[in-house]
Image (cartoon, rainbow, N blue to C red):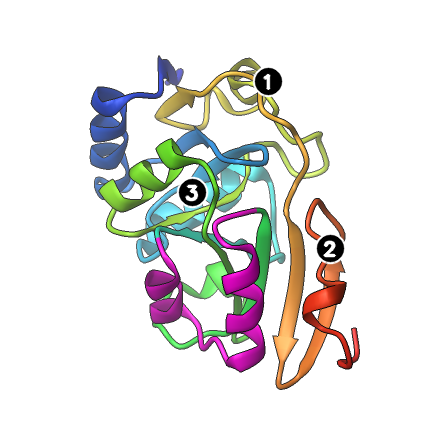
């Protein structure tokens, strides 16, 4: 099987949603890098995604269509909501306590999950078409560079996914990742969002 590449648009988004609902894998543009996605509630699809990436024990984030959808997956406390409302939609992933029942592989048994609302309208349209959630790990084989173009994603994953949505060249800077636990905010990965002013007075 070799993936089909289609320009992202209303028709291809509808096709992508069908792929996701049927348990397929999708590459799609975000506001950072190209994402590799599937239905986060489909255990078989999540397993297939991990095999495609060659990734074993590291949890993957979920992109959400809205703050409300994110809050259905994880518990966003006052500090997390403060960050979300300052930076969503945008390139900030918030790791928070998991409250929805999802496949074990998604959170790797940590009891926590990274979520964010992306700042690309077509990406949010796609996520909404898929039900409001879409796994959003980077579209690359583990250990290889993140994909900034559809062709780069195809070269790495073209034989492992069902559809690639081409959104042109992307900025290629992965999101900032923070973990929120109580009032403590820990920066797990630096990126385009600086959170210092939002966590003033808290340990980071």
Tell me where residue 118 appears, x and y as whole percent. Answer: 47, 45
Sort mark 3 into few (<14), some (14-19) or many (20+) by Cα contacts within 10 Å: some
Number of numbered markers? 3
Report the magenta stretch's main SS: helix
Judge from the rendering whether residue 156 lies leftward or rightward of residue 131; answer left or right.
right
Whole-number angstrom distance, CA of label 3 to CA of label 1: 20 Å
Judge from the rendering whether residue 140 lies leftward or rightward of residue 100; answer left or right.
right
Q: Please provide the residue range marked out in magenta.
A: 66-90
Residue 87 highlighted magenta (yes or no): yes
Q: Nearer the viewer, mark 1 or mark 2?
A: 2
Q: Nearer the viewer, mark 3 or mark 2?
A: 2
Whole-number angstrom distance, CA of label 1 to CA of label 2: 28 Å
Residue visible at 66% across and 57% down in the picture: 177
Tell me where residue 121 appears, x and y as whole percent. Answer: 38, 35
Which residue is disc 1 drawn over? Answer: 152
Vertical side of 28 occupied by 115: above or below? below
Whole-number angstrom distance, CA of label 3 to CA of label 2: 34 Å
Vertical side of 180 occupied by 166: above or below? above
Residue contact at pointers 3 and 1, CB within 8 angstroms? no
Which residue is disc 3 drawn over? Answer: 48
Which circle's residue, 1 or 2, is located before the other in the chain? 1
Q: Nearer the viewer, mark 3 or mark 1?
A: 1
Q: Residue furthest bottom?
A: 182
Sort mark 1 into few (<14), some (14-19) or many (20+) by Cα contacts within 10 Å: some
Which residue is disc 2 drawn over? Answer: 194
Vertical side of 22 occupied by 105: above or below? below
Along the viewing direction, whichever of 157 and 134 lies nearer the viewer: 134
Image quadrant holding the N terminus, namely: top left
Vertical side of 64 occupied by 202: above or below? below
Along the viewing direction, whichever of 158 and 70 lies nearer the viewer: 70
């Amino acid at each position: 099987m070799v993936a089909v590449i289609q320009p992202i648009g209303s028709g291809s988004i509808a096709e992508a949603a069908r792929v996701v609902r049927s348990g397929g894998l999708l590459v799609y543009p975000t506001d950072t890098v190209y994402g590799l996605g599937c239905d986060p509630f489909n255990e078989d699809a999540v397993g297939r995604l991990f095999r495609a990436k060659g990734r074993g024990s590291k949890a993957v984030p979920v992109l959400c269509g809205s703050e409300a959808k994110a809050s259905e997956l994880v518990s966003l406390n006052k500090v997390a909501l403060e960050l979300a409302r300052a930076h969503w939609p945008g390139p900030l992933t918030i790791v928070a306590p998991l409250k929805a029942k999802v496949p074990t592989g998604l959170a790797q048994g940590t009891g926590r999950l990274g979520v964010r609302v992306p700042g690309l309208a077509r990406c949010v349209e796609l996520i909404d078409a898929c039900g409001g959630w879409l796994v959003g790990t980077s579209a690359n084989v583990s250990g290889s560079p993140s994909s900034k173009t559809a062709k780069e994603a195809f070269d790495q994953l073209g034989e492992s996914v069902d559809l690639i949505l081409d959104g042109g060249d992307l900025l290629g800077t992965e999101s900032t990742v923070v973990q929120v636990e109580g009032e403590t905010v820990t920066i797990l990965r630096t990126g385009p969002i600086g959170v210092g002013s939002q966590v003033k007075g808290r340990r980071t």
